Image (tube, rainbow, N blue to C red):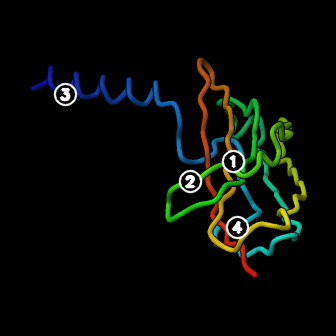
Amino acid sequence: MRFAFTILLALAFIQFTFADVFSQLQFMKITSPTSGQSIRAGEKVLIKYVMQPLVYKGTSNGYAKSLKINFHKRTGNQKEGLLENIYPKCPVTAQNDKYKTHSYYWTVPEGTAPGSYAFDFVELVQLRRSQMTVSETVKVNIVD
C-alpha cells in the first residue's frame, strides 16, 4: 500500500513538474479587456495588465520573461484561426516591491465581422529551475 501511494505521489509530482502550459497567467493579472465585453469593429480597445512585484510576500518565485497577445475568431470554445498577432513583444518589466501596470491601445480592424472572438495572452515564465508557457484567454464579442 505504501509503495503504491509513493508511486502515485511521484507520478503526480512528475506531471506537475513537466507541465508545459497552464491555463492562467502566473505573474500578471489582466484588467482589460474583460470576458464577455462587447466591442465594435474599428473601435480602440484598451489592453491593460498588472505585473506582480518581483518579490511577492517575501519570496521571489520567478518572473515573466515575455508576453505576446493574439486575437482570433472563436466558435464555442474552439479557436478558428489567428487573425492578428496584436502585440508580439509586450513589456513585462516589474518592480521589486510594487505592482506595475502596462497598457496599450489596439484598434479592431474595420472589416471584422460580428461574432465571438478572443484575446490570447501567452506568457513565458522563468521559475527557479525551469521555464514554462502559460496562457489565458479573454472572450469578447464583436457587435454591429
Q: Residue at coordinates 62% horizontally, 54% vertically from top-left? A: 137
Of the numbered discs in the image, which one, if any, rests on residue 133? none
Q: Residue at coordinates 47% horizontally, 30% vertically from top-left? A: 19
Q: Earlier in the sequence, mark 4 or mark 3?
A: 3
Q: Earlier in the sequence, mark 1 or mark 2?
A: 2
Residue located beneath label 2 in the image: 79
Query: Which picture quadrant has residue 52?
Result: top right
Residue type of the residue flagged with mark 4? Thr
Of the numbered discs in the image, which one, if any, rests on residue 121? 1
Check the image and name the residue furthest to the left: 1
Residue type of the residue flagged with mark 3? Phe
User: Label 3 to label 2, Cα distance in Å?
Assistant: 39 Å
- Count of marks, rendered view: 4
| Quadrant where the image shows the C terminus | bottom right
Q: Earlier in the sequence, mark 4 or mark 2?
A: 4
Circle 3: is it few (<14), some (14-19), or many (20+) Cα within 10 Å?
few
Please, what secondary structure does the residue beneath circle 1 have? strand
Residue located beneath label 3 in the image: 5
Residue located beneath label 4 in the image: 34
Q: Residue at coordinates 24% horizontally, 28% vertically from top-left? A: 8
User: Label 4 to label 3, Cα distance in Å?
Assistant: 42 Å
Q: Position of residue 72 (x, y in %)?
A: 67, 55
Query: Between tags 3 and 2, which lies in front?
Result: 2
Q: Position of residue 81 (x, y in %)?
A: 62, 50
